[in-house]
Image (spheres, rainbow, N blue to C red):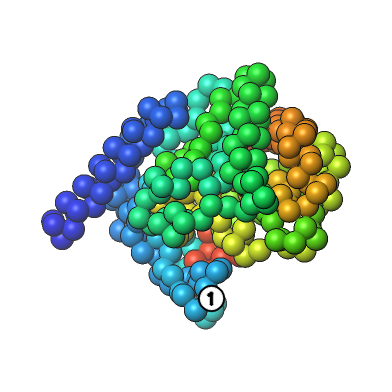
Amino acid sequence: MRSLAAVIALVAAGVAAVLVMNSAATGVAVTRLVGLSTDPNYVPAGAPLGMIGTDPDDPDDPWSAAAPPGGVIVQTPGPTASPSATGTIRIPVPKTIPTGPRRVGIQVGHWKTDDAPDELRRLIPQTGASWGELTELDVNLDVAQRLAAILAGKGIAVDILPVTVPPGYVADAVVALHADSDGVGQWSGFKMAHSARRGPFEDALLADVKKAYGDATGMEYDATHISNAMKGYFLFNWSRYQHSVSPYTPSVILELGYVSSDDDRGLMLDHPDKLAGGIADGILKFLSDTPRSKIFGQELVVPAFPSRPTRTSVP
């Protein structure tokens, strides 16, 4: 028992060190981890939570969920629970919470894949969509830089993120930028998705960006071709990847359009400010309607085999 306690203490110390390093990179306040490691149901970061899913790209490849940075408390069903009950996972409020200006992360799809950690190695050969000499990365990075400038001009602290995000990255919102191609030029429009295994604010973030982006660009929303890979995108898939944002950070993926579409490509090349402006308007609307105190004010409680997490008051 003493050796187990020592291991848990070392893990907690390591997590605290990660938080300190992240604070230097992202400008957030750090509070010491207190009390988690003393709970008998505490599962440290990276430790398995059980077999709960399959790879969206390979349904025959089951995978075991892992606790996110900071760890979780696994709560088993009580004696009055139904026979089918599977318990819940309580995710403590991050000990690293942004202070000062609102903070937004903009991830550039396929940017700096060579720097990806081992758990994301499968992404290294992926170069993204292309059409002729135009690559998805060209579009993603251009729009991200324009978007960052707009938000910074509104007093927002912005992090332009590559493929690899700091483990447990905490912000008021994160939008991942991508573009698509159907290879033939038939499809057009933009797409969005978020994970079901997160907090209750993704719906609002998605809705705000979706409306503002559609209004600004005139693009149609392509709900038909939203893939499982988008819904399970590693950026917000905390139960599978350590290099994902905090479960508390509202996060969505936005496919800006199809580089294979003449109309979409024309907007990307000739009117990138329209794309960036629409995204900015949606993010600003979300931040205005969703104060930081709401995002980080209550703990997440996720069913062990969840469809949607719920909130509970912080003890």
Kindly identify which residue carries mark 1.
59
Q: Position of residue 212 (x, y in %)?
A: 79, 38
Q: How many numbered discs, if any?
A: 1
Which residue is most to the left?
2
Quadrant position of the N terminus in the picture: bottom left
Q: Can residue 284 be seen by looking at this rendering? A: yes
Q: Nearer the viewer, residue 295 or 157?
A: 157
Amino acid type at mark 1? Pro
Q: Residue at x 64, y 51 (%)?
A: 130
Decide: is 193 above or below 32: below
Q: Residue at x 65, y 28 (%)?
A: 146
- The image quadrant that residue 173 belongs to is top right
Q: Nearer the viewer, residue 158 or 261?
A: 261
Q: Residue at x 49, y 66 (%)?
A: 304
Q: Nearer the viewer, residue 184 or 226?
A: 184
Left or right side of 227 for 101? left
Decide: is 186 above or below 236: below
Q: Can residue 291 be seen by looking at this rendering? A: no
Q: Residue at x 34, y 33 (%)?
A: 21
Q: Position of residue 312 (x, y in %)?
A: 56, 50
Q: Nearer the viewer, residue 29 or 166?
A: 166
Are there few (<14), some (14-19), or many (20+) residues within 10 Å of tag 1? few
Which type of secondary structure does the marked residue at label 1 adopt? Answer: strand
Decide: is 138 above or below 131: above
Left or right side of 209 for 8? left
- The image quadrant that residue 75 belongs to is bottom left
Q: Position of residue 137 (x, y in %)?
A: 58, 44
